[in-house]
């Protein structure tokens, strides 16, 4: 009768699992969540954003009109916003749900609000997706 020795060590299986977990954590921390914090949106007191690029519902780039290029939105740290350009100005309040990656603009003296999915929010770039599927990429004014 021949006696064989089986490798009953848990170490190889444990190392494989540990390395897999480490890789997953690294991938998530390096780029999983691209929606930043409220302070990235408004700065310490306020921050102004201008349209950089617009994508239609099919994801194709749309040419910004001259009026759209002049538009900007300023987010204040106290939850107010001012949006305008040329001779128009709209104001209201904003809320940002970081966990759900949702930005809501409630216009003053109107029963109208705009809701956006925040696809990316960094110190320099804001990428919003509207309910119709179109996207606006904005950059922070320096």
Image (cartoon, grey):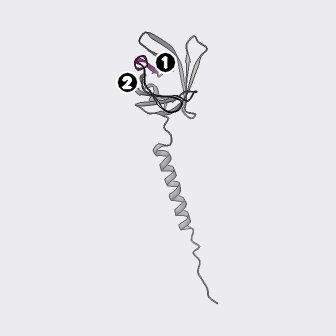
Could you say which is closer to the camera, residue 98 or residue 120? 120
Q: Which residues are magenta?
A: 64-76
Q: Residue most toward the left?
A: 142
Q: Secondary structure at mark 1?
A: strand
Q: Quadrant of the C terminus?
A: top left
* In this view, 116 is above or below 25: above
Residue 67: percent from the left, percent from the top? Answer: 42, 16
Task: Answer above or below: position of 27 versus 82.
Answer: below
Question: Which residue extends farthest right?
Answer: 1
Which residue: 53% across, 32% down? Answer: 58
Picture layout, residue 88 above or below residue 5 = above
Q: Residue tagged by mark 1?
A: 81
Q: Which residue was labeled with disc 2?
A: 141
The mark nearer the N terminus, 1 or 2, is: 1
Mark 1 neighbour density, 10 Å: few (under 14) some (14–19) many (20 or more): many
Mark whose residue sits in front, 1 or 2 = 2
The magenta stretch spans residue 99: no
- Please tell me which residue is depicted at 50% across the width and 14% down the height of the picture: 91
Name the quadrant of the N terminus.
Answer: bottom right
Residue 112 falls in image quadrant = top right
CA distance for labels 1 and 2: 15 Å
The image shows residue 7 at horizontal and vertical percentages of 57, 75
């Amino acid at each position: 009768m021949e006696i064989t020795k089986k490798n009953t060590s848990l170490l190889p299986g444990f190392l494989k699992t540990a390395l897999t977990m480490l890789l997953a954590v690294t991938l998530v921390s390096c780029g999983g969540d691209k929606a930043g914090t409220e302070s990235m949106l408004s700065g310490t007191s306020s921050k102004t954003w201008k349209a950089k690029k617009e994508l239609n519902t099919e994801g194709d780039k749309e040419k910004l009109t001259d009026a759209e290029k002049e538009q900007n939105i300023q987010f204040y740290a106290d939850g107010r916003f001012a949006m305008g350009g040329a001779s128009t100005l709209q104001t209201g309040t904003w809320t940002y749900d970081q966990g759900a990656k949702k930005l809501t603009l409630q216009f003053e003296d109107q029963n109208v609000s705009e809701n956006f999915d925040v696809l990316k929010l960094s110190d320099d770039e804001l990428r919003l997706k509207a309910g119709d599927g179109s996207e606006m990429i904005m950059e922070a004014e320096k």
